[in-house]
Image: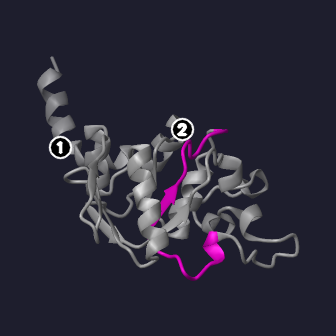
Amino acid sequence: MAYDKFTVHTSTAVPLPLENVDTDQIIPARFLKATKREGFGDNLFRDWRYNSDNTPKADFVLNNPTYSGKILVAGRNFGSGSSREHAAWAIYDYGFRCVISSFFADIFKGNSINIGILPVTVSPEFLEKIFTAIYADPKAEIEVNLLSQTVTIVASGESEGFEINSYKKDNLINGYDDIDYLQAMKEEIGAFEKERIF
Protein backbone atom coordinates (compact mmCIF):
# COMPACT_ATOMS: atom_id res chain seq x y z
CA MET A 1 0.00 0.00 0.00
CA ALA A 2 1.56 3.26 -1.12
CA TYR A 3 1.68 6.22 1.23
CA ASP A 4 2.15 9.96 0.88
CA LYS A 5 5.52 10.87 -0.58
CA PHE A 6 7.84 12.56 1.88
CA THR A 7 10.42 15.05 0.60
CA VAL A 8 10.21 18.29 2.60
CA HIS A 9 7.63 19.07 5.27
CA THR A 10 7.42 22.54 6.77
CA SER A 11 4.84 22.69 9.52
CA THR A 12 3.97 23.86 12.98
CA ALA A 13 4.48 21.15 15.59
CA VAL A 14 2.79 19.54 18.57
CA PRO A 15 5.03 19.26 21.66
CA LEU A 16 4.90 16.11 23.80
CA PRO A 17 7.94 16.43 26.09
CA LEU A 18 7.39 13.10 27.84
CA GLU A 19 10.06 10.40 28.01
CA ASN A 20 9.53 6.65 27.62
CA VAL A 21 6.20 6.92 25.82
CA ASP A 22 5.38 3.30 25.00
CA THR A 23 3.15 1.81 22.34
CA ASP A 24 0.38 1.00 24.83
CA GLN A 25 0.16 4.69 25.65
CA ILE A 26 0.21 5.57 21.95
CA ILE A 27 -2.65 3.14 21.18
CA PRO A 28 -4.09 1.10 24.08
CA ALA A 29 -4.36 -2.66 23.54
CA ARG A 30 -8.18 -2.68 23.62
CA PHE A 31 -8.20 -0.86 20.26
CA LEU A 32 -6.09 -3.41 18.36
CA LYS A 33 -8.95 -5.58 17.09
CA ALA A 34 -9.32 -3.88 13.71
CA THR A 35 -7.23 -5.17 10.80
CA LYS A 36 -7.61 -2.19 8.48
CA ARG A 37 -5.27 0.74 9.02
CA GLU A 38 -7.99 3.38 9.18
CA GLY A 39 -9.62 4.85 12.26
CA PHE A 40 -6.77 4.38 14.70
CA GLY A 41 -6.12 8.13 14.86
CA ASP A 42 -9.36 8.56 16.83
CA ASN A 43 -7.76 6.61 19.67
CA LEU A 44 -4.24 7.98 19.51
CA PHE A 45 -3.13 8.57 23.14
CA ARG A 46 -6.71 7.62 24.07
CA ASP A 47 -6.22 7.37 27.83
CA TRP A 48 -4.34 10.66 27.94
CA ARG A 49 -6.82 12.46 25.66
CA TYR A 50 -10.12 11.38 27.20
CA ASN A 51 -11.73 10.84 30.56
CA SER A 52 -13.62 7.62 31.31
CA ASP A 53 -16.85 9.31 30.15
CA ASN A 54 -15.19 10.13 26.78
CA THR A 55 -14.96 13.85 27.46
CA PRO A 56 -11.65 15.42 26.35
CA LYS A 57 -9.02 16.15 28.98
CA ALA A 58 -8.38 19.87 28.63
CA ASP A 59 -4.77 19.63 29.82
CA PHE A 60 -3.61 17.16 27.14
CA VAL A 61 -1.77 18.74 24.23
CA LEU A 62 -3.86 17.15 21.44
CA ASN A 63 -6.92 18.81 22.97
CA ASN A 64 -5.21 22.19 23.07
CA PRO A 65 -6.05 24.23 19.94
CA THR A 66 -2.90 26.30 20.52
CA TYR A 67 -0.83 23.50 19.00
CA SER A 68 -1.29 21.80 15.65
CA GLY A 69 0.66 20.56 12.65
CA LYS A 70 1.99 17.48 10.92
CA ILE A 71 5.04 17.13 13.20
CA LEU A 72 5.00 15.56 16.66
CA VAL A 73 7.97 16.49 18.85
CA ALA A 74 8.43 13.92 21.60
CA GLY A 75 10.73 13.19 24.52
CA ARG A 76 13.46 10.56 24.61
CA ASN A 77 12.71 6.86 24.04
CA PHE A 78 9.51 7.26 22.05
CA GLY A 79 7.71 4.10 20.94
CA SER A 80 9.15 1.66 23.46
CA GLY A 81 7.26 -1.41 24.67
CA SER A 82 5.45 -3.95 22.48
CA SER A 83 6.08 -4.11 18.75
CA ARG A 84 2.49 -3.35 17.67
CA GLU A 85 2.32 -1.73 14.22
CA HIS A 86 -0.92 -0.09 15.30
CA ALA A 87 1.03 2.58 17.17
CA ALA A 88 2.50 3.86 13.92
CA TRP A 89 -0.87 3.47 12.20
CA ALA A 90 -2.52 5.65 14.86
CA ILE A 91 0.07 8.40 14.48
CA TYR A 92 -0.25 8.37 10.67
CA ASP A 93 -4.05 8.21 10.74
CA TYR A 94 -4.19 11.18 13.12
CA GLY A 95 -2.29 13.25 10.56
CA PHE A 96 1.31 13.32 11.72
CA ARG A 97 3.91 12.72 9.03
CA CYS A 98 7.01 13.14 11.17
CA VAL A 99 8.00 12.44 14.76
CA ILE A 100 11.11 14.12 16.18
CA SER A 101 12.82 12.73 19.28
CA SER A 102 16.32 12.20 20.66
CA PHE A 103 15.80 8.40 20.69
CA PHE A 104 13.31 5.90 19.24
CA ALA A 105 12.68 2.25 19.97
CA ASP A 106 14.02 0.35 16.95
CA ILE A 107 10.87 -1.63 16.14
CA PHE A 108 8.65 1.44 16.35
CA LYS A 109 11.10 3.32 14.14
CA GLY A 110 10.95 0.59 11.50
CA ASN A 111 7.16 0.33 11.66
CA SER A 112 6.87 4.10 11.19
CA ILE A 113 9.10 4.27 8.14
CA ASN A 114 7.25 1.36 6.57
CA ILE A 115 3.96 3.28 6.56
CA GLY A 116 5.18 6.74 5.58
CA ILE A 117 6.08 8.40 8.89
CA LEU A 118 9.58 9.84 9.15
CA PRO A 119 11.10 9.33 12.63
CA VAL A 120 13.86 11.89 13.02
CA THR A 121 16.52 11.44 15.69
CA VAL A 122 18.20 14.65 16.84
CA SER A 123 20.58 15.40 19.68
CA PRO A 124 19.05 16.08 23.12
CA GLU A 125 20.36 19.64 22.89
CA PHE A 126 18.68 20.31 19.55
CA LEU A 127 15.47 18.66 20.72
CA GLU A 128 15.41 21.09 23.63
CA LYS A 129 15.86 24.00 21.21
CA ILE A 130 12.86 22.77 19.22
CA PHE A 131 10.70 22.56 22.33
CA THR A 132 11.82 26.05 23.38
CA ALA A 133 10.93 27.46 19.95
CA ILE A 134 7.46 25.86 20.01
CA TYR A 135 6.64 27.07 23.50
CA ALA A 136 7.87 30.58 22.68
CA ASP A 137 5.68 30.64 19.57
CA PRO A 138 3.15 27.85 18.89
CA LYS A 139 3.09 29.00 15.25
CA ALA A 140 6.83 28.42 14.89
CA GLU A 141 7.52 26.25 11.87
CA ILE A 142 9.90 23.31 11.70
CA GLU A 143 11.29 22.23 8.33
CA VAL A 144 12.07 18.54 7.97
CA ASN A 145 14.01 18.00 4.76
CA LEU A 146 14.44 14.34 3.93
CA LEU A 147 16.40 15.10 0.77
CA SER A 148 19.15 16.93 2.66
CA GLN A 149 18.48 15.01 5.90
CA THR A 150 18.16 18.16 7.99
CA VAL A 151 15.76 19.58 10.56
CA THR A 152 15.55 23.37 10.76
CA ILE A 153 13.85 25.76 13.15
CA VAL A 154 12.66 28.16 10.47
CA ALA A 155 12.59 31.37 12.52
CA SER A 156 16.14 31.07 13.83
CA GLY A 157 17.66 29.08 10.98
CA GLU A 158 19.21 26.65 13.46
CA SER A 159 19.60 23.26 11.84
CA GLU A 160 20.82 19.76 12.54
CA GLY A 161 21.34 16.72 10.33
CA PHE A 162 19.91 13.26 10.88
CA GLU A 163 20.71 9.75 9.67
CA ILE A 164 18.47 7.39 7.73
CA ASN A 165 19.02 4.15 5.82
CA SER A 166 19.32 4.94 2.09
CA TYR A 167 16.81 2.26 1.10
CA LYS A 168 14.23 3.53 3.58
CA LYS A 169 14.91 7.11 2.49
CA ASP A 170 14.23 6.19 -1.13
CA ASN A 171 10.98 4.47 -0.15
CA LEU A 172 9.75 7.50 1.79
CA ILE A 173 10.61 9.86 -1.07
CA ASN A 174 8.63 7.68 -3.48
CA GLY A 175 5.78 6.85 -1.09
CA TYR A 176 6.61 3.13 -1.20
CA ASP A 177 6.33 0.34 1.29
CA ASP A 178 8.51 -2.74 0.76
CA ILE A 179 6.06 -4.35 -1.67
CA ASP A 180 5.66 -1.15 -3.70
CA TYR A 181 9.45 -1.04 -3.99
CA LEU A 182 9.55 -4.53 -5.48
CA GLN A 183 6.61 -3.75 -7.79
CA ALA A 184 8.47 -0.70 -9.08
CA MET A 185 11.41 -2.95 -9.97
CA LYS A 186 9.27 -5.55 -11.74
CA GLU A 187 10.83 -4.98 -15.18
CA GLU A 188 14.37 -5.09 -13.82
CA ILE A 189 13.58 -8.27 -11.88
CA GLY A 190 12.08 -9.86 -15.01
CA ALA A 191 15.12 -8.93 -17.08
CA PHE A 192 17.46 -10.34 -14.43
CA GLU A 193 15.44 -13.57 -14.34
CA LYS A 194 15.63 -13.98 -18.12
CA GLU A 195 19.40 -13.61 -18.04
CA ARG A 196 19.64 -16.43 -15.50
CA ILE A 197 17.45 -18.98 -17.37
CA PHE A 198 19.59 -21.80 -18.78
Q: Secondary structure at mark 2?
A: loop
User: Up-down: is 64 above or below 182?
Assistant: below
99 left or right, relative to 85:
left
* Marks 1, 2: nearer the viewer: 2
> Is residue 113 shown above or below 144?
above
Tell me if residue 64 is in the magenta stretch: yes
48 relative to 127 in the view: left or right: right
Q: Residues within 10 Å of mark 1 (few under 14, many from 20)?
A: few
On screen, residue 73 versus residue 157, left or right, reads right
Q: Of all residues shown, which one is farthest toward the right?
A: 53
Front in this rendered view, residue 103 or 146: 103
Q: Which residue corresponds to mark 1?
A: 187
Regarding mark 1 in the picture, which secondary structure is present there?
helix
* Span highlighted in magenta in the image: 61-82
Q: Quadrant of residue 123?
A: top left
Q: CA distance from mark 1 to mark 2?
A: 36 Å
Residue 60 falls in which quadrant of the image? bottom right
- Name the spot of residue 45 as percent of width and height, x first: 68, 61
Give the camera-side residue of 17 and 69. 17
User: Which residue is identified by label 2?
Assistant: 105
Q: Amino acid at mark 2?
A: Ala
Q: Is residue 38 visible?
A: yes
Q: Quadrant of residue 158?
A: bottom left
Residue at the limit of the structure toward the bottom, as seen here:
65
- Which callout, 1 or 2, points at the residue further toward the start of the chain? 2
Q: What secondary structure predominates along the stretch shown in magenta? A: loop
Residue 115 visible at all: no
- Give coordinates of residue 118: x percent, y percent: 39, 53
